[in-house]
Image (cartoon, rainbow, N blue to C red):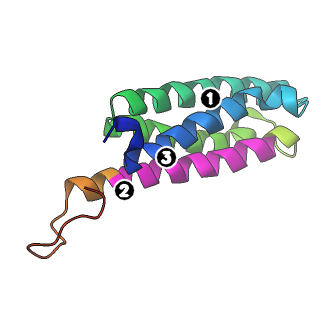
Amino acid sequence: MSRLQERETVPDVYNLFLAAVLFISPWLFKLTSSQGRIDLWVTSAIIGILSLAAIIAYRDWEEWLNVLMGAWLIASPWLLGFPHTRAMHFSIGFGAVIVLLALLDLFLHYEKAHPEGMEPGQERAHQ
């Protein structure tokens, strides 16, 4: 089975796609907050690089950094001063999904590495 077909890689592919959409969203949706645009561009570029790195050579720290970047997206409208704007809605929505996908990826890798909850003779469905 190729690396891209493994179930644990799918959240990274989704995060890469979300990073691309987040990067172009200031142009697509004409976001006017300059702090919001810059934050979305920089954060989405970092998330995209981390997701691509996780697809190529998975490490747990890449997913934890994606969790932090998603949390940053959730908190940044208030920390950078663009609450109550359209950019805030994109930032919070995408941040929540990115955090959930990164945590899901961590969970899937943990479950694959620690199959001790199974009875003897039982096989994992995805192996």
Magenta stretch encompasses residue 29: no
Determine the main secondary structure of the stretch shown in magenta: helix
Residue at (87% x, 42% y) in the render = 86
Residue 72, image x, y percentages: 60, 39
Residue at (33% x, 29% y) in the render = 57
Q: Amino acid at mark 1?
A: Thr
Q: Residues within 10 Å of mark 3 (few under 14, many from 20)?
A: many
Q: Is residue 127 left or right of residue 106?
A: left
Tag 1, which secondary structure? Answer: helix
N-terminal label among 2 and 1: 1
Q: Please identify the quadrant where the C terminus is shown.
A: bottom left
Q: In front: mark 3 or mark 2? A: 3
Q: Would you say the residues marked 3 and 2 are in contact, meaning their CB atoms lie under 8 Å apart?
A: no
Q: Please identify the quadrant where the N terminus is shown.
A: top left
Residue under pointer 3: 11
Q: Amino acid at mark 3?
A: Pro
Residue 24, image x, y percentages: 76, 27
Q: From mark 3 to mark 2, how far is it between C-alphas? A: 11 Å
Q: From mark 1 to mark 3, how far is it between C-alphas? A: 18 Å
N-terminal label among 1 and 3: 3
N-terminal label among 3 and 2: 3
Residue under pointer 2: 107
Q: Which residue occupies the foreground of this view, 36 or 19?
A: 19
Residue 12, image x, y percentages: 48, 40
Q: In front: mark 1 or mark 3? A: 3
Residue under pointer 1: 43
Q: Which residue occupies the foreground of this view, 112 or 36?
A: 112
In magenta, the rendered stretch is 88-108
